[in-house]
Amino acid sequence: MKKAIVVASFGCSIKDSRERYIETIENAVKDTYKDIDCFRVFTSEIIRRKMKREENLDIDNMKSCLQKLKEENYTHVYVSVTHVIPGFEYEKVLKAVNEYKESFEEIKTARTFLDEYMGKDEVNVIKSYVNTNLKDDEAIVLVGHGTGHDAHKYYGKIENLLKIDINNLHIANIEGNPYIDDIMGELKKYKRIYLYPLLIVSGDHALNDIGSDDKESIQSKIAANGIDVKMFFTGLGENENAVNLFVDRLNEILTV
């Protein structure tokens, strides 16, 4: 029996952000399963090409990684994913795993951060990620990536779960409903907004689409309504509880 763990992420072309968020999860997996070989996969072809062009780094996608594991005679493969929702990027992982299922004695894929089974564990992670000590005239806005995939529904579902404990909490998305403009009417009743990326990595989206000084950024749009905005340039990848949750996801498929 020859086991391998694959940690599959969307990827990030900003070196500092990659180390701060993605490698934190990868290292936690390696530290937990020291006796199992661990491999990196980035599912974004754009990120992979950019890293090759700018840093001369060759990062496997899911298919190329599985082909190498097959050639190196691994028998059991366990795929940890760091994606927020089971959308198009997660489907890339599942498709490759399905193509190679006959090449290994066992191959399993872990769950994403949010999915149909989410509940108090995911709520508790996000509560540890944000400032929950709010005054009546303060609110939290979490900004997700958004997608045209059906899995977009999980943003709304986690918002509903979070609102049970944090009424002054809203989720908007960069690409998909609700956009920040869609909820601005609700936000105008607050004097201060705490703005957080609902992302694993605080990279291009956090720096530009959410927190930049550009008038089209989410932070600027909120501030234009006379609301004080405190932007947090952070990501779930550096939250200890989120990292532990991803390790737990992996443990679920390793022990079944």
Image (spheres, grey):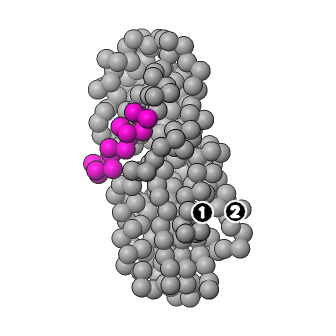
Residue that protrudes farthest toward the front in the picture: 256
**Amino acid residing under circle 2:** Thr
In this figure, what is the number of numbered marks?
2
- Taking the magenta stretch, the answer to whether it contains residue 252 is no
Q: Is 116 left, or right, of 177 in this rendering?
A: right
* x and y, in percent, of residue 54 in the image: 52, 59
Give the secondary structure at mark 2: helix
Question: What residue is shown at x 32% (from left), y 24% (from top)?
Answer: 183
x and y percentages locating residue 83 in the rendered image: 46, 54
For the residues labelled 1 and 2, say whether their Cβ atoms are less than 8 Å apart: yes
Separation of marks 1 and 2 at Cα, in angstroms: 10 Å
Residue 196 spot, x, y in % from top left: 50, 32
Of the pair 157 and 59, the residue shown nearer to us: 157
In the picture, the quarter occupied by the C terminus is bottom right
Q: Residue at x 67, y 57 (%)?
A: 28
Q: Nearer the viewer, mark 1 or mark 2?
A: 1
Which amino acid type is shown beneath numbered disc 1?
Asn
The answer to if 152 sits in the magenta stretch is yes
Q: Is 108 rendered above or below residue 129?
A: below
Q: Quadrant of residue 63?
A: bottom left
Residue placed under numbered mark 2 in the picture: 32
**Magenta residues, as a range?**
147-161
- Residue found at x 56% / y 38%: 124
* Residue pointed to by mark 1: 251
